[in-house]
Structure formats: C-alpha cells, structure tokens
Amino acid sequence: MTTGRRRDVERFGRKSLPLKAFALFLWPLSAFAVSNLHAAEVIPPKPEKYFNDYAHVASSATVTELNQRLEQFERDTSSQIVVAVYPKMQSDSSIEDYTVRVAQSWGIGQKGKDNGAVLFVFVQDRKMYIQVGYGLEGPCPTPWRSGSLRTRLSRTFATVILMPACTRA
C-alpha cells in the first residue's frame, strides 16, 4: 500500500513536470502580451495651455485669444476647459476609448471636483470628441455634448480656426 504523499508524487510528479515548465514559460508571455495591448497607442503629455494647436491650423493671434478666454472662463467658473488639436489620432482604438484614457491621464479640472472638459480634434482623421469630467455632467448633460453641439462646434471650429488657416495658405 502506498502512502498519500507517494501517490501524489506518482500522480503529479514526473509526468506533470513538462506541463509545469510550459505553464511557467507561458505566464510571463501572457503578461507581456497584455502589457503591449495598447503598444501602438501614444498618450500625449498633459498640455500646458488651455488651447493647444499641435496641428498648426490656428493663427498665433487666435491661439492667444482662445487661451485668454479659456483662462478667464476658469477664473469665473472654476471649471477648466482644454482644447487639444492634433494632426492625427495616435491609436487604433475608437475615439471614445482613446480620448477617455488621455483625459484621465491628464486629470483636467480641480482635484476632487473633477470639473474639467477636454475637446479633442484630430484634423486628418476629421474627428472630434468631448470628454467631460463627472463634476461637469450636471451642467453639461449628455444631449448637450452630442448631436447638435457637435454640429455647432464643427461649424464654429471651421469658421474660427480652419478658414483663417486656409486663407493664409
């Protein structure tokens, strides 16, 4: 009669050694694969200004004016709005997923109040998206952030920023 320990060795011992080695080999690889899930994605550093034109579509006078207006808006309301204009979105994710990761990494708005909003514009992709912090969701309900607002923002953006850039070119 064999003891319990010897039976376990026979059952799980030598025959399972290749399986254990294989599992130990796969475990680090699976962690590497998960960490590289968003490897093609670039999270840009937090902007230093309110209006950030990395695509160079706005004139310097427009950039200065918009920065002053957005700074005054923050002084008046304590809510912070940042505009980031990029040539192209640097991710394979959807615009919603990508912009939420970028906005969370930036931490726009006051700490604890989460009262910030970021307008993302990707010129070559012809996409724009607004990420609003939880602290602004009351003043900025979902219907306001979608549909008609996007139409108005697109027209305003084209009129204020893109048209002067086109006439300069």
Image (cartoon, rainbow, N blue to C red):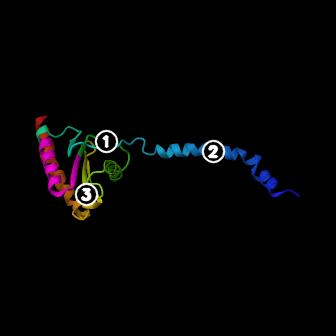
Taking the image as drawn, is residue 123 in sight? no
Between the C-alphas of marks 1 and 3, the distance is: 20 Å
Secondary structure type for disc 2: helix
In which quarter of the view is residue 62 placed? top left
Q: Is residue 112 above or below residue 19?
A: below
Residue at image position (16%, 45%) is 67
Magenta stretch containing residue 73, yes or no? yes
Q: Residue 45 bears which disc, if any?
A: 1
Q: Residue 24 bears which disc, if any?
A: 2
Q: Quadrant of the N terminus?
A: bottom right
Give the side of residue 66 with respect to residue 99, left or right: left
Q: Residue 6 bears which disc, if any?
A: none
- Residue extending furthest toward the front: 112
Which stretch appears magenta? 62-83
Q: Residues within 10 Å of mark 3 (few under 14, many from 20)?
A: many
Q: Amino acid at mark 1?
A: Pro
Q: Amino acid at mark 2?
A: Leu
Is there a contact, CB below 8 Å, between mark 3 and mark 2?
A: no
